[in-house]
């Protein structure tokens, strides 16, 4: 039986003693960090009316809503779509590598500390890079059901659309029949889509534990996934309670830290709307930048604490089948 109080105390002490773990935790939230840092500059660059739902509704009601003329040829449009798709793919892969290596480094540092070996940033990152191939294979295997479920949703939506088009163009189906087929098809798509969030949460939990199994016990991908299932069956109650506590704590603290930005956003809304060409706009953007960095660092500490706590907990449970 895990002593959760002792586990949290040990994790806090480790995170406080090795402050380079804060940087690794910051890298685990790099996606939110990027958008937080870009927000004040995007807010200064984007016209305020573009961010106002009321302004868009007024345009629609007045009938003056017009899309900007792009003056693009078909070849140019496809080129921009291709470049955008490639850029998005590269960003997603880079984001995944940074987050996964950072998590591996946190796991490695916790393992070193629990074995009474002082951890260092460079060594922890090397450990994280060493775990990367196994972590990539675990990710691919764990999230395969989500990929297949998304493909099934697309297949159902496509089949519903094609069947509806066939009935409309090739037969004399009534409007009631067509509407019924359309509604039933999209209700199936919606039902499948509702399965994705809870399934994703369960798989993220399993992935978190499988990463620790591979790193702590040196297991290969198949053995790590098999042994992780055994540990979950043997300690389901403890792991579930720990998941509720750690994920709940991360969510609540992340939400509270985000509230820190609200007073700053309210105070700097007018200067940011005036643009970054004025001194007030530059100071407002700088203040937003500092607050965003502070909030990201606080969230990074929470990420580091959570990763360390999971590692120490799994190390303890895997010793006691």
Image: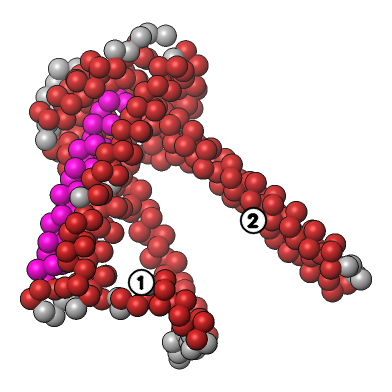
**Does any portion of residue 83 appear in the rendered image?**
no
**Residue 154: numbered disc:** 2
- Asked which secondary structure carries label 1, the reply is helix
Q: Where does residue 288 sit, x and y in percent of width and height? A: 17, 61
Q: Where does residue 175 sit, x and y in percent of width and height? A: 84, 68
Which quarter of the picture shows residue 221? top left
Depth check: give the residue in front, 55 or 255. Answer: 55
Which quarter of the picture shows residue 125? top left
Nearer the observer: mark 2 or 1; the answer is 1
- Asked which secondary structure carries label 2, the reply is helix
Q: Tell which circle, 2 or 1, labels the residue nearer the N-terminal end.
A: 1
Q: Which residue is mark 1?
A: 51
Depth check: give the residue in front, 231 or 168. Answer: 168
Locate the N terminus and report the quarter of the image it occupies: top left
Q: Which residues are magenta?
A: 282-311
Magenta-highlighted stretch: main secondary structure? helix
């Amino acid at each position: 039986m895990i002593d959760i109080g002792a586990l949290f105390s040990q994790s806090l002490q480790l995170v406080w003693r090795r402050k380079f773990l804060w940087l690794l935790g910051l890298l685990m939230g790099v996606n939110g960090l990027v958008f937080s840092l870009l927000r004040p500059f995007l807010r200064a660059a984007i016209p305020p009316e573009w961010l106002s739902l009321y302004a868009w509704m007024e345009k629609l009601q007045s009938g003056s809503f017009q899309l900007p003329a792009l003056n693009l040829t078909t070849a140019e449009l496809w080129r921009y779509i291709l470049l955008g798709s490639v850029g998005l793919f590269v960003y997603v892969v880079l984001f995944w590598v940074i987050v996964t290596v950072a998590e591996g480094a946190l796991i490695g540092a916790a393992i070193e500390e629990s074995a009474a070996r002082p951890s260092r940033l460079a060594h922890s990152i090397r450990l994280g890079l060493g775990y990367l191939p196994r972590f990539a294979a675990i990710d691919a295997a764990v999230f395969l059901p989500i990929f297949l479920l998304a493909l099934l949703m697309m297949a159902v939506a496509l089949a519903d659309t094609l069947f509806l088009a066939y009935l409309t163009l090739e037969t004399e189906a009534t409007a009631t029949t067509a509407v019924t087929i359309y509604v039933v098809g999209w209700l199936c798509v919606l039902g499948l889509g509702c399965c994705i969030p809870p399934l994703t949460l369960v798989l993220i939990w399993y992935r978190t534990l499988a990463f620790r199994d591979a790193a702590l016990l040196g297991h290969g991908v198949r053995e790590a996934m098999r042994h992780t299932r055994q540990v979950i069956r043997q300690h389901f109650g403890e792991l579930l309670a720990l998941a509720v506590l750690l994920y709940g704590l991360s969510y609540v603290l992340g939400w509270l830290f985000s509230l820190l930005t609200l007073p700053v956003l309210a105070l700097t809304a007018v200067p940011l709307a005036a643009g970054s060409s004025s001194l007030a706009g530059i100071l407002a953007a700088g203040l937003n930048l500092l607050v965003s960095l502070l909030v990201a660092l606080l969230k990074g500490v929470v990420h580091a604490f959570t990763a360390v706590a999971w590692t120490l907990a799994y190390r303890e449970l895997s010793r006691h089948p």
